Image (spheres, rainbow, N blue to C red):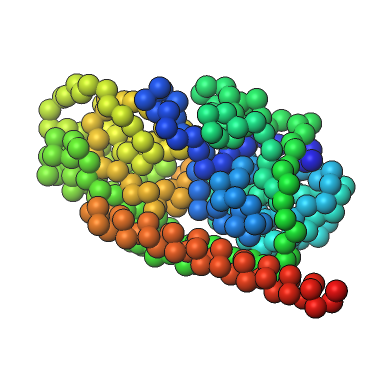
């Protein structure tokens, strides 16, 4: 079990999300950086979608009430295990009674504390993710609080030397300039409702993520982009990545807790392969949309899949070496 000693609002239990219920008004929820969550689970030998702790406000401190392997992925944060530092993106064996402190990241926005066996909370509609709007999933459908006790599932012992390169060091990046995050996006259904000038500004503006951003959507500050004429659309299905333009002319990118339906004009959609990068962009970051097509979006997702499959192969090799050594000693 894990006891939460110190936490701030917004920290929750998340897995890869809750799928198949959007037509009933139930969003997916799930990790904002699904690549980091899967990588941590692969290192631990968990199921890829095992639940972990998504931490986005700091400091965060927990005590381990039983020995466990852990992997901390996502943002580059300072990690302290009972007075001893250790690196993110590596396996670490934690003894019963030790405390783990996670400080504010130097780079990135969200940290994932993945634990051997996963976080064992009830699965609701096929997922353990916290659905904040509905008040269910995770731990009682709410943010974590000091004093919360979390159970962990059964897991396999791992080779503690195993680690991973963060996806930012392996996957292609399209950052147009220093301190600007490039995000590939495909023109969406209402793209041509916008004038040529508005479309040009959309692709060439360095948008700033505003403080009015959260897991539901990122609101962007920059030059206005508006349809050529006012339009009222019937509500349509919404998924993470859709870029809507409200009457203010400042786009909103739907995120993991995206609404299930909406009516604002859709100018573009961030490709699935780049959503993890947006999920790691802190408030105040600058982003620029880079136009691509469906074929490029599919190819980019194939690269993410390859990154995860390569990590699984390496993690399996480490575990295989450990098993062989144990057999030789016995």
Residue 62 or residue 38, whichever sits in front: 38
Say if 139 sits above or below 58 in the image: above
Quadrant of residue 140 in the image? top right
Residue 108, percent from left and from top: 54, 52
Residue 298, percent from left and from top: 31, 56
Q: Residue at x 72, y 56 (%)?
A: 156
Horizontal placement of 88 versus 205: left or right?
A: right
Residue 94 or residue 254, whichever sits in front: 94
Horizontal placement of 292 versus 182: left or right?
A: left
Q: Quadrant of the N terminus?
A: top right
Residue 307 or residue 271, whichever sits in front: 307
Spot the residue most to the bottom: 328
Q: Is residue 316 visible?
A: yes
Say if 68 sits above or below 233 in the image: below
Say if 79 sits above or below 133 in the image: below
Say if 89 sits above or below 125 in the image: below
Q: Quadrant of the C terminus?
A: bottom right
Residue 105, percent from left and from top: 61, 52
Horizontal placement of 235 versus 239: left or right?
A: left
Q: Residue at x 62, y 27 (%)?
A: 142
Q: Residue at x 62, y 67 (%)?
A: 316
Horizontal placement of 307 versus 51: left or right?
A: left
Q: Is residue 111 visible?
A: no
Quadrant of residue 171 in the image? bottom left
Quadrant of residue 216 in the image? top left
Residue 70, percent from left and from top: 71, 54
């Amino acid at each position: 079990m894990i006891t939460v000693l110190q936490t701030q609002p917004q920290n929750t239990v998340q897995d890869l999300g809750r799928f198949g219920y959007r037509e009933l008004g139930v969003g997916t929820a799930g990790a904002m950086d699904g690549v980091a969550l899967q990588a941590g689970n692969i290192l631990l030998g968990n199921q890829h979608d095992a639940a972990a702790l998504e931490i986005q406000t700091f400091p965060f401190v927990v005590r381990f009430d039983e020995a466990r392997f852990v992997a901390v992925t996502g943002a580059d944060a300072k990690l302290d295990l009972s007075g001893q530092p250790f690196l993110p993106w590596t396996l670490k064996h934690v003894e019963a009674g030790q405390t783990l402190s996670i400080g504010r990241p130097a780079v990135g926005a969200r940290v994932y504390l993945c634990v051997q066996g996963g976080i064992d909370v009830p699965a609701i509609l096929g997922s353990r993710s916290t659905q904040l709007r509905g008040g269910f999933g995770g731990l009682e459908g709410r943010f974590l609080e000091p004093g919360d006790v979390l159970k962990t599932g059964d897991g396999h012992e791992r080779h503690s030397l195993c680690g991973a390169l963060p996806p930012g060091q392996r996957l292609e990046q399209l950052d147009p300039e220093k301190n600007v995050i490039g995000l590939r996006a495909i023109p969406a259904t209402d793209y041509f409702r916008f004038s040529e000038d508005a479309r040009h500004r959309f692709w060439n503006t360095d948008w700033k993520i505003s403080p009015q951003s959260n897991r539901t959507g990122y609101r962007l500050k920059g030059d206005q982009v508006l349809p050529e004429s006012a339009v009222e659309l019937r509500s349509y299905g919404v998924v993470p990545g859709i870029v809507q333009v409200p009457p203010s002319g400042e786009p909103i990118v739907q995120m993991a807790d995206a609404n299930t339906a909406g009516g604002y004009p859709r100018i573009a959609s961030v490709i699935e392969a780049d959503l993890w990068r947006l999920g790691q962009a802190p408030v105040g970051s600058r982003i620029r949309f880079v136009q691509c097509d469906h074929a490029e979006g599919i190819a980019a997702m194939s690269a993410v899949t390859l990154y995860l499959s390569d990590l699984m192969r390496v993690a399996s090799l480490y575990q295989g070496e450990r098993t062989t050594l144990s057999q030789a000693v016995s």
